[in-house]
Image (cartoon, helix red, strand yellow):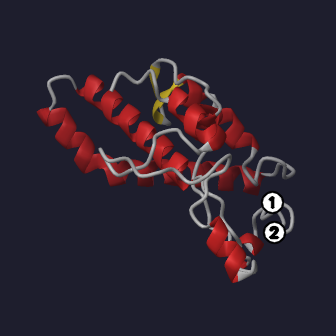
Amino acid sequence: MNSTIGIGGIFDPAGAMGYHPTPGDLGLVLASYGVGEGPYLYLPFFGPSDLRDSTTVPANIVISPTFPAPSSTGLTIFTASSTALNAVNTRAGLLGEISNIKQTALDPYATFRSLYRQHRAAQLRQMDKDDVITPPAWYPAKVRAKMKGRHYGGPPPKPSSKNGHGAAGKGLGKMGAGGGAGASGTGL
């Protein structure tokens, strides 16, 4: 909706209608469809990744709002500057953690790999958890009450007596079963 009515995401009509933003990226979408993560990679200038997520780098460049614009010196400078500033800002925010891991870990590479995979697996679990029907604010209250908490593809998950997080993979539609498949080879 924001891509069309919101003129490429400049405006947020979905938010005004009661829809909540869902953070994610192309790697998480591919994982939800069952694409495996592949080997761990460390990409210069991009940081830790895996084969599945590294294929999203070119896609992110293409879907950038500056990509389809006619090329000009100002646009090139803006794109390079914003990319460089984003990289420097991200790195600066992580310097303390990176230094701590390098000083305390027996094998920093294995630690970074494990932390990256755990983080992506947690993002997938959160995406599965958030994949519920979102009734917009303009729906009648009775309809919203019926829809609240329902997952796509089935009834809401029933709480499990072991962990209280619901039946894993049941009632989550394509995201429940497929999302777990993407993170199954993590070796966690």
Please identify the quadrant where the C terminus is shown. top left
Task: Count neighbours of disc 2 (C-alpha within 10 A) and say few if under 14, some if 14 to 19, many if 20 or more.
Answer: few
Regarding residue 117, the answer to whether it shows in the image is yes
Please state the horizontal and vertical placement of residue 165, each as a whole percent of the image.
Answer: 39, 50
Q: State the SS at label 2.
A: loop
Identified at 28% across, 47% down, the residue is 95
Left or right of 82, for residue 96: left
- Residue extending furthest top? 39
State which quadrant residue 118 falls in: top left
Q: Answer yes or no: do the residues labelled 2 and 1 have beta carbons within 8 Å?
A: yes
Q: State the SS at label 1.
A: loop
Please state the horizontal and vertical placement of residue 112, each as a whole percent of the image.
Answer: 31, 31
Identified at 39% across, 41% down, the residue is 119
**Residue type highlighted by circle 2:** Gly
Identified at 18% across, 42% down, the residue is 100
Q: CA distance from mark 2 to mark 1?
A: 6 Å
Which residue is under mark 2?
A: 6
Please identify the quadrant where the N terminus is shown. bottom right
User: Front-most of 26 and 32?
Assistant: 32
Task: Count neighbours of disc 1 (C-alpha within 10 A) and say few if under 14, some if 14 to 19, many if 20 or more.
Answer: few
Please state the horizontal and vertical placement of residue 151, each as a whole percent of the image.
Answer: 61, 53
User: Front-most of 119 and 70?
Assistant: 119
Q: Is residue 147 above or below residue 94?
A: below
Left or right of 137, for residue 162: left
**Residue type highlighted by circle 1:** Ser
Identified at 52% across, 24% down, the residue is 37
Regarding residue 81, the answer to whether it shows in the image is no
User: Front-most of 183 and 105?
Assistant: 183
Which residue is under mark 1?
A: 3
Please state the horizontal and vertical placement of residue 5, each as a whole percent of the image.
Answer: 86, 68
Q: Is residue 1 above or below residue 173?
A: below
